[in-house]
Amino acid sequence: MEFGRKLLYGFQNKYWKPKNTILPIHAEIGSQNVSSSEEYRLMIEASETYTTKRQKSQDFENGNLDFQLQDDNLSEVKQRERNARKHIVLWKKPLTTLQFFILESIYCLKEWVLKLRTRKKTIAAVSISAIIFLILYYNDGPHLKYFHKWQKTILWCVYWIGLGVLSSVGLGTGLHTFLLYLGPHIAAVTLAAFECMSVDFPEPPYPDQIVCPETSEDSMSVWNIISKVRLEAFMWGFGTAIGELPPYFMARAARLTGVDPDDEDYEEALAQEEDENPTALSSRAKSAVRKLIQRAGFLGIMLCASIPNPLFDLAGITCGHFLVPFATFFGATVIGKAVIKMHIQKLFVIITFSEHHVDSLVDLIGMFPKFGPSMQAPFREFLKKQKDNLHRPVGQHVESSQSWLQWFFEKLVIVMVLYFVISIVNSMAQSYMARMQKKKRERNSD
């Protein structure tokens, strides 16, 4: 009778125990005669369950959350960790954020050094090539004319590729280099082309400065301007394609190795793969992107890259997760971003800043009541000054008098660059905290 009562208590403790309730075992197991090994096993399990739950209850009361961390759902734990990381920003916790940023920078530097040490042949080849190039560059000979011929073009291409990478690589919030650099450059070339009726600007000073050539054409077409800015636009688009590679490689490595990258976008992409009927508008849009890439392949990737698409990171994650070949993903991305999308953006800027459209826009500003004429005057002054500068002789110095429009744009660029730098600091600090949280989870799971 006593054995049956204890066995009933053990069974209740294991399967029927109400929440936050611990049922006692009133007798010692060793004092009873056990009729079978199965009954003995059940009694041992009941005793261990009771002991473990009492220990967890005491640890929770004492503030030890390690047991709670093990029992909670992993996705809920990660969500709480993400919410905690959102507070690691300069305007909330400046000292902690700067500390984590410095530690993350040191960690990344160590990782890069270790990776370089494993690629000694590549480092040796690059070093030898650089030494040979420097020897040839600083020694006179017939080869120098070819070096000087291509030097400016190569540096020009590297400059725009770098700006494209900064625009899409995912450092902080990303630097909107099209709005800050490429767009204004195309607009300046467009205004100069219609004023000079030519795109054969003297080099130098182009592209640093634009001066009208001595000869002009009878008419100016949009296609002439597109051809003039094709190189820098393509290189900028190529740089944005390079910046889309990290999500692809992250998802591909996670799929091949089975290691959880602990990335919010990656986990969201996997969750959408399991969700057959998404309800939210953003979820439906992301699901549509994923299905388009899965069904259309190369053409689907190219289509997603050809339009201004803030969800293209999801395309990279999807391609990496489903092990789409690198040549397929990168080739479609380059064609979409550097060819199709850049022509669309160039056409928009050129048509917007063509001479008759600019004049119409300035006239429209003057039609605003009260403030219209006062706002129209600086724009007319700025355009007149730019046109006068275009017709100056090559090499002539121009007195610089800054208008409030130029002052405002310069300060806007400074603010956006500073915000970009701050976002990088916050992002790296949060990455360090995420690594520490992951290590804590691994220790608690052992």
Image (tube, rainbow, N blue to C red):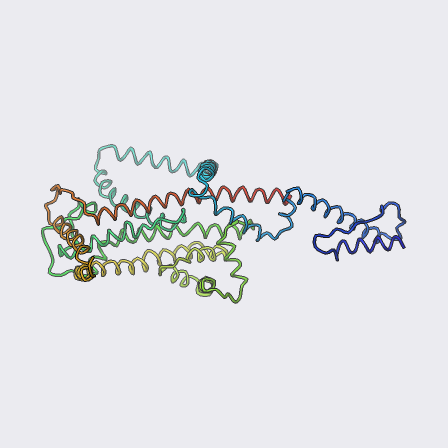
Q: Residue furthest front?
A: 370
Q: Position of residue 133 (x, y in %)?
A: 30, 36
In which quadrant is the C terminus drawn?
Answer: top right
In which quadrant is the N terminus drawn?
Answer: bottom right
Placement of 52 over or under 319, stated as above or below: above
Name the residue nearer the viewer: 382 or 161. Answer: 382
Position of 361 with respect to 118 (left or right) is left
Name the residue nearer the viewer: 436 or 129. Answer: 436
Q: Position of residue 167 (x, y in %)?
A: 35, 50
The residue lying at 61 percent from left, 42 percent from top is 443
The answer to whether residue 338 of the structure is visible from this angle is yes
Name the residue nearer the viewer: 281 or 321. Answer: 281
Position of 393 with respect to 164 (left or right) is left
Q: How many marks?
A: 0
Name the residue nearer the viewer: 355 or 270. Answer: 355
The answer to whether residue 109 of the structure is visible from this angle is no
The residue lying at 29 percent from left, 47 percent from top is 413
| Res 148 quadrant in image | top left
Placement of 370 over or under 408, stated as above or below: below
Q: Position of residue 85 (x, y in %)?
A: 50, 46
Q: Position of residue 105 (x, y in %)?
A: 44, 38
